[in-house]
Every structure is written in structure tokens, then in C-alpha cells.
Image: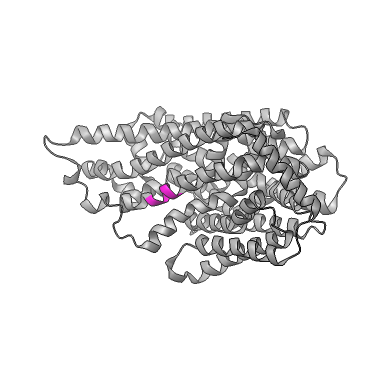
């Protein structure tokens, strides 16, 4: 069923978009300098930090890709959710608080390249350049996946041609990022995260009640759901399970998630933010799996409404929302898909913009640029990156999941080992950091092309990146006295804060 723009569902969409633009305007008023634009002036409290980190992580695949995969294959697809929860928790535990403290002590770093350059006294700026280039390459691809997801939503719901839907979906996100910067993105992420969790709790509960109401006396789900759909080990090999669980490794290197840790108002906000974020994440992932699984008996009992889902399993959440709720509530639930797309795409655009502005424009072209100039350059860079992403996404055959998987692996392997070891290992050197980034990124690029063993490329990329950091650091000259002292000072200060 396609909607017209005077339909209540479409009206709810419009209300949601206007609200996001309004928040962008408020973010504009709160943006005075580059730190405000790309890091929110390090002012985020626990609640906003938690939900912003969660929303920026979970893109459209949470409400489309994961439920669709479970609908087709059953609970064997839930391994990816387990891996993500484990990875996210360890990221909060091992990285979040230390990164927040270290980035402030390392020259008040505003970006990931800035942090690594300051942490390893990168006088020649080679580490800064390599880090920025890796971010731009993989994030442009990541941004393109978000543009494609938004286009698919508008295309499927309103019957727009793909090209029109591409521009409409992208414009919705670009507008408030361009205007409001990090503050607008973080505030809208908080609203969008709340919308997403509401939708993923409400939809499966109502669908479950609908299924229960249709069952005959003495009948249970096994009568209408194939037994293999209940089996998490169905068709699963060791390599397949490891590949799904390994998605959790990606968290340690995702710039759009790490920047949320950097933007927290203080280290003391991190524990509460972790608890809020993990609760939100677990509920959302359980809800997404439940939507897909409950959709199996629901559409078996409602064959007349199953045509769209049978044609494209990723529409299972959309169809349940439209068939079980009145149009106004359905509009709010379906806006959660747009929220998931917009929240991730917006922070990706901002991270790309910050890399171009802080790590290339100011570092090499205009070292004495005013704060106002840098903010406007940042806005221009958002537009430039968005246009490139739209160009990449212009192919109607573009596949969202494949693009996300590639970029996720690239960041996880290139930056994950480097970030962890930079926070925990005093002996790590600039040469080791460079080797780890290059080894991780190149391994992902090569492994992706050949697909050896059917193993997700993040696994060999992360392992080889970790080994490269350690081996090259040990073989290269020891860190300078000032680097050792700075590292020791951060560790002592962190220990005194008693963050748990």
C-alpha cells in the first residue's frame, strides 16, 4: 500500500520532519565556534550521550534489515545481535571514559585524527592524514548506504521514482546537520532513539497479541512456524557464527560512536550513560528480532496482507505497523525508520565534515582561520560529502547491507586495535599506530575482494591490525619521555576518578 501526502501517516511524517528542522535551528543558535559545531562544546549529559551514541549506531537496518533477516531465516540470525551487545558493552567499558579523558588532555582534540596526532606527537602530520583519509573513504561509502536506505523508504511508501526519493530522503537529513551541527544531531538523536525504542516495543507486542487471538484452542506457534525457524544453530557453521558475532569488534573503531564519548560533559557521566545506552540497545535488538520472528506466524495467518512482505522481507516492520495500528499511530511508528536512517547518516556527515575541516583545512591550509570561518567551512563540507554520497547512491541497484558491512569492517579493523592500545599501552608508538591503521584497512579491502573462507573481513583485519601495532611498536624507537609522562598522568587521573 502506497501513501498519498494527505494521508494521516504522511502527515505524521511531515510533523516529524518539521520538528527535526526546528531542532536544527535551535542547534544553530547554540553554535558559536568549531568545538560547538563538531563536538557540542563537550556539553552532553549522560542521557543525551547514551541515546545519541545508540541512535548514531543503529541505522535503518535495525527496523528493516534485521527483522527481515529473522523473518526469512528465523532465530539463527540473532547471533549478530548477541555480538553487537557484547561489543558495545566492552566499548563502553574499555574505551569510553578513557577516550573522553585522553582527548581532552591530548591538546583538547576535537576529532579522531586530532587525538591520534596529539597522542603520538605526530609532527609530520602523516598519522593525521592517513587517519583522515581512511575516515573519508569508508564514511563516504557509509553515508551512501544511509542515503540509499532513506530513498528506499520514500520510494516504497509514497511511490516516488528512486531518483526523486534519493534527493528527498537526503535533503531531510542534510538540512538540520548543515544548520545545527553536533548539538542539533545529538538532540535529534535523543528524540529519534526514543521513537525507535517505542516502535520496537509496541509493534511486536501488538503483533503477538494479534497472533494469539487467531490461534485455535490447543494450537501453538509450532503448528504454523517451521521448527527450523526456532533453531539458532540451523544451517550455522563455526565460520558463520564467528562472522556474525564479530560485528561486535567494529564498535571499537567507529568514529561516529567514539565522538559521542569525546563529547560527554565529563568522565563521571560515562557510567550512567553506559547503563542507559546498553538498556536501550538490548531492548531495541530484542524488539527487532521479535518483529521478524512474530511476523512469521502473523503473516501465515493473514495471507491476504502478506504480499508486500513476501516480495521484500525487509518491509515486515512497515507492514505490521500499517496493518495493526490506526494511520496516525502507524505514521509515528514508520517515522522510526526514518529516525534510524537520519540519526546515523547525520553523525556520519558530521564526522566527515570535521575530518575535512579540522584535520585538513585548518591543519594544512588555514592554520589561523577564525572560528566563524571554520564553522562555515564545516557546513560546506557537510554539503560536499552529502553530494558525493548521493552520487554513489544514485545506482538503483545499490545494496544497503553490503555497503554498511564493508564500512563497519573497515573502521573496526583500521581503528579498533589502535584506539584500544593507545588508551591502555604505554609502549605504543606513532609507527605502530600507522602500521595498525594501514594493516587493518588493507586487510579488509583485500579480504573483501576474495572472500576467503567465507569469513567476515573484520576478523582477519582486526587481528592483523592488532599484531601490526604491537610488533612495529616494539621494533621502533621507544615513545618519547613526554609521551610516556602524558600517558602515565592520564592513567593516574583516571584511577583517581573511580569510574565504574
Q: Along the line of sight, which residue is nearer the eye, 251 or 468?
A: 468
In the picture, the quarter occupied by the N terminus is: top left
The main secondary structure of the magenta stretch is helix
**Nearer to me, 389 or 34:** 34
Name the quadrant containing residue 345. top right
Is residue 39 positioned above or below 428 on the image? above
Image spot of residue 416 (x, y percent): 59, 54
Say whether residue 25 is magenta.
no
Quarter assignment of residue 410: bottom right
Residue 484 rendering spot, x and y as whole percentages: 75, 51
75 vs 282, left or right, is left
Of residues 235 and 242, which is closer to you in this image?
242
Identify the residue shown where x is 76% and y is 57%. 479
Q: Is residue 11 above or below residue 154?
A: above
114 vs 41: above or below: below
User: Going by the image, does 134 lie left or right of 483?
Assistant: left
What's the image's color scheme?
one colour
Residue 26: x, y in percent? Answer: 67, 27
Residue under the point 54% across and 34% down? 51
Q: Is residue 322 visible?
A: no
Residue 500 % position (x, y): 56, 35
Q: Which residues are magenta?
A: 79-83
Could one spot residue 208 in this view of the protein? yes
Amino acid at each position: 500500500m502506497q501513501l498519498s501526502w494527505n494521508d494521516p501517516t504522511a502527515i505524521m511524517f511531515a510533523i516529524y520532519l518539521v520538528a527535526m528542522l526546528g531542532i536544527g535551528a535551535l542547534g544553530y543558535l547554540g553554535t558559536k565556534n568549531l568545538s560547538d559545531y563538531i563536538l557540542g562544546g563537550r556539553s552532553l549529559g549522560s542521557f543525551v550521550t547514551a541515546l545519541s551514541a545508540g541512535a548514531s549506531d543503529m541505522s535503518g537496518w535495525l527496523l528493516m534489515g534485521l527483522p527481515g533477516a529473522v523473518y526469512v531465516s528465523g532465530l539463527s540470525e540473532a547471533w549478530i545481535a548477541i555480538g553487537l551487545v557484547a561489543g558495545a558493552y566492552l566499548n563502553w567499558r574499555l574505551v569510553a571514559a578513557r577516550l573522553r579523558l585522553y582527548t581532552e588532555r591530548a591538546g583538547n582534540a576535537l576529532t579522531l585524527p586530532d587525538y591520534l596526532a596529539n597522542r603520538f606527537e605526530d609532527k609530520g602530520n602523516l598519522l593525521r592524514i592517513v587517519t583522515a583519509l581512511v575516515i573519508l573513504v569508508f564514511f563516504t561509502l557509509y553515508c551512501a548506504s544511509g542515503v540509499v536506505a532513506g530513498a528506499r523508504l520514500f520510494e516504497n511508501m509514497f511511490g516516488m521514482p528512486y531518483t526523486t526519493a534519493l534527493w528527498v530522503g537526503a535533503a531531510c537529513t542534510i538540512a538540520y546537520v548543515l544548520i545545527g551541527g553536533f548539538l542539533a544531531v545529538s538532540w535529534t538523536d535523543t528524540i529519534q532513539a526514543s521513537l525507535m525504542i517505542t516502535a520496537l516495543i509496541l509493534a511486536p507486542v501488538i503483533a503477538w497479541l494479534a497472533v494469539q487471538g487467531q490461534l485455535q484452542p490447543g494450537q501453538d506457534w509450532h503448528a504454523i512456524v517451521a521448527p527450523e525457524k526456532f533453531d539458532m544453530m540451523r544451517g550455522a557453521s563455526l565460520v558463520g557464527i564467528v562472522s556474525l558475532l564479530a560485528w561486535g569488534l567494529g564498535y571499537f573503531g567507529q568514529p561516529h560512536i567514539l565522538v559521542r564519548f569525546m563529547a560527554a560533559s565529563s568522565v563521571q557521566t560515562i557510567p550512567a550513560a553506559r547503563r542507559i545506552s546498553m538498556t536501550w540497545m538490548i531492548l531495541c535488538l530484542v524488539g527487532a528480532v521479535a518483529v521478524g520472528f512474530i511476523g512469521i506466524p502473523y503473516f501465515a495467518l493473514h495471507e491476504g496482507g502478506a504480499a508486500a512482505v513476501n516480495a521484500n522481507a525487509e518491509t515486515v516492520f512497515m507492514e505490521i505497523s500499517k496493518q495493526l495500528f490506526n494511520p496516525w499511530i502507524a505514521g509515528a511508528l514508520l517515522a522510526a525508520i526514518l529516525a534510524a536512517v537520519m540519526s546515523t547518516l547525520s553523525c556520519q556527515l558530521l564526522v566527515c565534515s570535521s575530518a575535512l575541516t579540522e584535520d585538513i583545512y585548518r591543519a594544512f591550509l588555514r592554520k589561523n582561520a577564525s572560528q566563524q570561518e571554520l564553522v562555515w567551512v564545516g557546513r560546506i563540507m557537510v554539503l560536499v560529502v552529502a553530494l558525493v554520497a548521493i552520487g554513489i547512491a544514485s545506482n538503483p541497484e545499490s545494496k544497503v547491507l553490503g555497503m554498511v558491512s564493508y564500512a563497519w569492517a573497515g573502521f573496526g579493523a583500521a581503528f579498533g586495535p589502535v584506539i584500544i592500545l593507545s588508551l591502555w599501552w604505554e609502549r605504543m608508538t606513532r609507527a605502530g599506530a600507522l602500521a595498525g591503521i594501514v594493516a587493518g584497512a588493507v586487510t579488509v579491502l583485500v579480504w573483501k575482494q576474495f572472500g576467503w573462507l567465507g569469513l567476515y573481513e573484520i576478523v582477519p583485519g582486526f587481528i592483523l591490525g592488532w599484531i601490526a601495532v604491537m610488533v612495529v611498536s616494539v621494533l621502533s624507537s621507544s615513545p618519547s619521555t613526554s609521551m610516556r609522562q602524558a600517558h602515565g598522568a592520564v592513567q593516574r587521573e583516571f584511577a583517581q576518578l573511580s569510574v565504574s
